[in-house]
Amino acid sequence: MLTVHWRCVSGVTVANDGHLLTLSNGSLAIVDVRTADTANYTCRAENRHGADEIVVSLVVQGTLTLSLSYDIILYRKFSKQWLK
């Protein structure tokens, strides 16, 4: 069985605290990323054949604000008309 652990630069294992999460596929997810998350993160994968590590460097340079705008477009199936 494969196990995956992420550690911050300080050596503290990611604790799935709602901000830093290890997903079921082994990926690291950071919720509401901020500049304080800038760091090196170590991923360690282990199974019965051995283990390996890789260090990933994350640099957060600022925040991103998204503004979404969309139109709802409906298609009448029977009359084959587009409505907006």
Image (cartoon, helix red, strand yellow):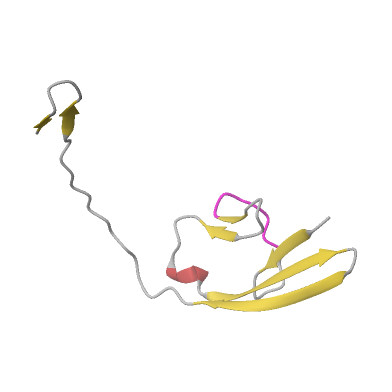
* Residue under the image location 74 percent in, 69 percent down: 44
The quarter of the picture where the N terminus appears is: bottom right
Give x and y (percent) for residue 22: 64, 56
Would you identify the image quadrant in which residue 80 lies? top left
* Residue under the image location 44 percent in, 56 percent down: 32
Name of the residue lying farthest toward the right? 48
* Residue under the image location 67 percent in, 60 percent down: 14
The quarter of the picture where the C terminus appears is: top left
Would you identify the image quadrant in which residue 41 lies? bottom right
Give x and y (percent) for residue 15: 68, 55
Give x and y (percent) for residue 20: 58, 57
Decide if residue 31 is on the left or right side of residue 24: left
As drawn, 81 above or below 71? above
**Main SS, magenta residues:** loop
Is 69 or 10 nearer to us in this picture? Answer: 69
Decide if residue 21 is on the left or right side of residue 35: right
* Residue under the image location 44 percent in, 70 percent down: 35
Give x and y (percent) for residue 48: 90, 63
Would you identify the image quadrant in which residue 28 lies? bottom right
Decide if residue 57 is on the left or right side of residue 44: left
Instruction: Give the magenta part as a residue range.
Output: 13-19
Name of the residue lying farthest toward the top? 78
Decide if residue 37 is on the left or right side of residue 56: left
How many numbered markers are drawn?
Answer: 0
Is residue 14 magenta-colored?
A: yes
Is residue 56 magenta-colored?
A: no
